[in-house]
């Protein structure tokens, strides 16, 4: 294919991906009651599954009701004339992007794979599925852990008992959607490290050297986002540390594979 033919193929790849996102967005827009009442606004209520799981965990550990959430004493309000409509659009777009993500990754793989060498194609087979699993895991981690813990902490935080929390709707929705979406993107770390290791940019030794620094950053972020107790911080920081360790293993495997490929390349004798 010529350069222009490649651009045309890329254009149709992006068009098909955009259509999938828009279709999922339209479905989410129509299913407003389900998306908002049962998904977006669910972490605002003390009966949310995460709060109940933390309460049960605290009782199992002999901590009594220390991890239980009695009530979330804040109200949501809309202070803009078009605020609820644009909030509806933003939530629908994020929902459409999350739902259509597997198809988008498949379209990108369909565009990239024909240009790969057969050995490269075999080595990268399953990348779209791996990226989808990582993204779904990150979205679940953000929605069921980071978002509710952040809502619980910031929603109940008060500088004075005389100041009541009346949270703007767009601020609340921004926290839920951004935490959920960005956590899904952060969970792509092993895949990014795998590609960088195959390209020879990052190796496992580099990741091992800065492991302690990365863990400190993870613990600081977990301490900021979670209530001030050790159990919550470990629950949040544990999966992120595990993700970092998985990245080290993938980088080591990619480096070994790259070295074997270089060893199989026949040397060309120097001409006299």
Image: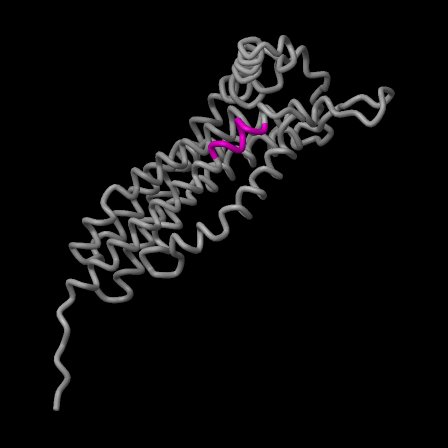
Q: Is residue 241 above or below residue 272?
A: above
Using the rendered view, name the quadrant where residue 203 is placed: bottom left
User: Where is residue 18 drawn, in percent x and y?
Assistant: 39, 43
Is the magenta region chiefly helix, strand or loop?
A: helix
Query: Which residue shows up at 58% across the image and 13% down it?
Result: 58
Which image quarter is the N terminus in?
bottom left
Vertical comparison of 110 with 144: above or below: below
Residue drawn at x 49%, y 34% as measured from the top left: 94
Q: Residue lying farthest bottom? A: 272
Instruction: Check residue 238 for magenta coloring.
Output: yes
Magenta span includes 80: no
Quarter residue 126 falls in:
top left
| Pick the front one: 118 or 199 | 199
Residue 63 drawn at (x, y percent): 62, 12
The foreground one among 77 and 270 is 270
59 to 37, vertically: above or below: above
- Determine the residue located farthest toward the right in the rendered image: 162
User: Which span is picked out in magenta?
Assistant: 233-239
Instruction: Identify the residue at horizontal 55%, vertical 12% (top origin).
Output: 61
- Specify whether 112 is left or right of 63: left
How far across and down, in percent of the image, does residue 120 sit?
Answer: 21, 54
């Amino acid at each position: 294919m010529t350069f222009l033919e490649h651009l045309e193929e890329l254009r149709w790849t992006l068009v098909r991906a955009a259509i999938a996102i828009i279709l999922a967005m339209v479905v989410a827009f129509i299913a407003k009651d389900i998306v908002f009442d049962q998904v977006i606004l669910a972490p605002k209520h003390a009966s949310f599954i995460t709060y109940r799981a933390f309460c049960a965990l605290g009782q199992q550990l002999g901590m009594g009701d220390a991890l239980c959430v009695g009530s979330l004493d804040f109200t949501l309000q809309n202070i803009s004339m078009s605020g609820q409509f644009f909030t509806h659009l933003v939530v629908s777009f994020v929902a459409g992007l999350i739902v259509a993500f597997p198809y988008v990754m498949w379209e990108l793989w369909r565009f990239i794979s024909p240009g790969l060498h057969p050995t490269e194609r075999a080595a990268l087979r399953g990348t779209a599925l791996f990226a989808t699993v990582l993204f779904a895991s990150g979205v679940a981690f953000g929605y069921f852990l980071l978002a509710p813990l952040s809502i619980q902490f910031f929603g109940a935080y008060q500088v004075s008992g005389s100041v009541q929390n009346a949270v703007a709707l767009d601020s609340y929705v921004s926290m839920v959607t951004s935490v959920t979406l960005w956590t899904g993107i952060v969970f792509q770390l092993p895949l990014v490290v795998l590609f960088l290791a195959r390209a020879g940019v990052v190796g496992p030794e580099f990741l091992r050297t800065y492991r302690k620094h990365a863990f400190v950053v993870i613990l600081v972020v977990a301490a900021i986002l979670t209530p001030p107790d050790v159990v919550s911080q470990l629950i949040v920081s544990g999966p992120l540390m595990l993700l970092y360790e998985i990245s080290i293993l993938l980088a080591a495997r990619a480096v070994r594979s790259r070295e074997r490929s270089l060893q199989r390349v026949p040397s060309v004798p120097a001409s006299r």
